[in-house]
Amino acid sequence: MKNRNDCRIATGMLPVLFAALLLNGVGWAQSGFKTLYTFKGGQDGSGPAAGLVTDAAGNLYGTTQYGGSNKAGTVFRLTPNSGGGWTETTLYDFCNQSNCADGAYPVSPLIFDGLGNLYGTARGGQDAHYCTDGCGVVFELTPSATGDWTESVLYGFTGGADGADSLAGLSFDVAGNLYGTTWQGGVITSFCYDGCGVVFELSPEINGWIESVLHAFMDEWDGSNSWAASPIFDRAGNLYEEGWNGGQYGNGNVFQLSPNGDGTWTENVLHQFKGGKDGGHPQGGLVFDSAGNLYGITRESSPGYGTIFALKPESDGSWAKCILHRFTGGIDGADPYAGVTLDPNGNVYGVTNDGGAHGYGVVFRLKPTSACGGSYRVLHAFKDGPGAYPQGNLIIGNGSLYGTTYGDGSKTFGSVFEITP
């Protein structure tokens, strides 16, 4: 059985009264930080924009958006050495030729199935419709006994009703079906000239994988342009995601898709971002805590440079929103690209792409202190050097956090780091 991104929803929850958010300034915490690998910008890749995934042996896997033998991105593995240090191995180089069907320029995280195969999305792929650089693909990497990895394209988007420009990550359900979103394609409206994007399912069949569109965004109410986030599920099989754009106020939303039993799905919008103090343009995905509350980030807010937010289910079926932190653009960071990660104690971790003491982003921790409050701490402020501008979600393993930095693309080309809070 393949892995599922599962969570636990609390039932019969009483309405939660949100307390005011009380922060005693921006704190600092002493943390052990080290760079595990620095990309050179050549055949080893450049610009990892996504987070990492780990296997049972403690190896780390990820993608770079550029670099590699064909300058179109890579899939890589970092292996810990017995004497210390890490060894980088390029598992796959994406093609960079016209009509190259294997895809290019991946920006989404990878996931494993139960057999050790890797799955992800990439831009590029065969030219079709209006996608002059390719409409994107869903791919699988399969290891061999000799250590080589073989890529198979499970689905190539055409740019029509099936979607286009696959930027987001993937998730499995318990039956082994894959779910994801596209940035464009689907329904073309006056707001979305290239389509507003879709939520799709890929089902394994004897003759290959079959795509089904679960929802096509219309922009005006239900949102559009889901970006770089992997869908998550609750135990009832409902799917949760974000629309980066569109919605009632044009600033994106958080939505739920519920299966109807006949193959169709019904959308329920949980929150419409108003912009301004409410924030706007959510990105990086959602995560549940043990009580069934959702956490995420927005790229924008006014005042501020993005927010950390929580959505909490009410007894009447609605969801109440509170802002846990509003980034100031100063030492606390600015412009978060990645979503947040929760540890077993409910602490919230993440990164910002900009801001911080040196202007190159931060790693942060938010400790919840009330129903809608928390104590915010900067764990690390990046400097221009081996790491700058983190954009991918963090993962937790063996008491440490692992992540990537993108680099500036001229002097630095990204890194993989570890931090122990």
Image (spheres, helix red, strand yellow):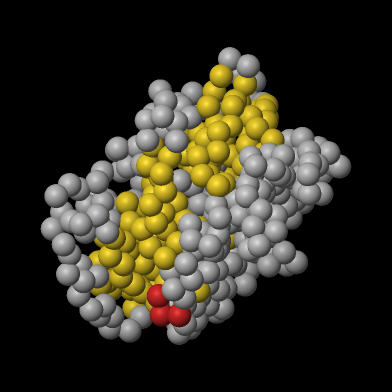
Residue drawn at x 41%, y 29% as measured from the top left: 262
In the image: residue 6, left or right of residue 2: left
Residue 93 is drawn in which quadrant? top right
Residue drawn at x 59%, y 25% as measured from the top left: 209
In the image: residue 333, left or right of residue 312: right
Residue drawn at x 63%, y 37% as measured from the top left: 138
Which of these two is toward me, 43 or 126?
126
Which of these two is toward me, 58 or 375?
375
Residue drawn at x 48%, y 71% as measured from the top left: 249
x then y, percent, for residue 231:
45, 46
Residue farthest top in this picture: 206
- Residue 410 against residue 48 in the figure, above or below: below
Quarter of the picture containing the N terminus is top left
x then y, percent, for residue 235:
29, 38
Residue 341 is drawn in which quadrant? bottom left
Residue 259 is drawn in which quadrant? top left
- Residue 210 against residue 135 in the figure, above or below: above
Q: Is residue 111 visible?
A: no
Q: Is residue 193 visible?
A: yes
x then y, percent, for residue 146:
64, 20
Residue farthest front in this picture: 190
- Residue 214 against residue 13 in the figure, above or below: above
Which of these two is toward me, 376 or 8?
8
x then y, percent, for residue 211:
58, 32
Count the labels in the image.
0
Quarter of the picture containing the C terminus is bottom left
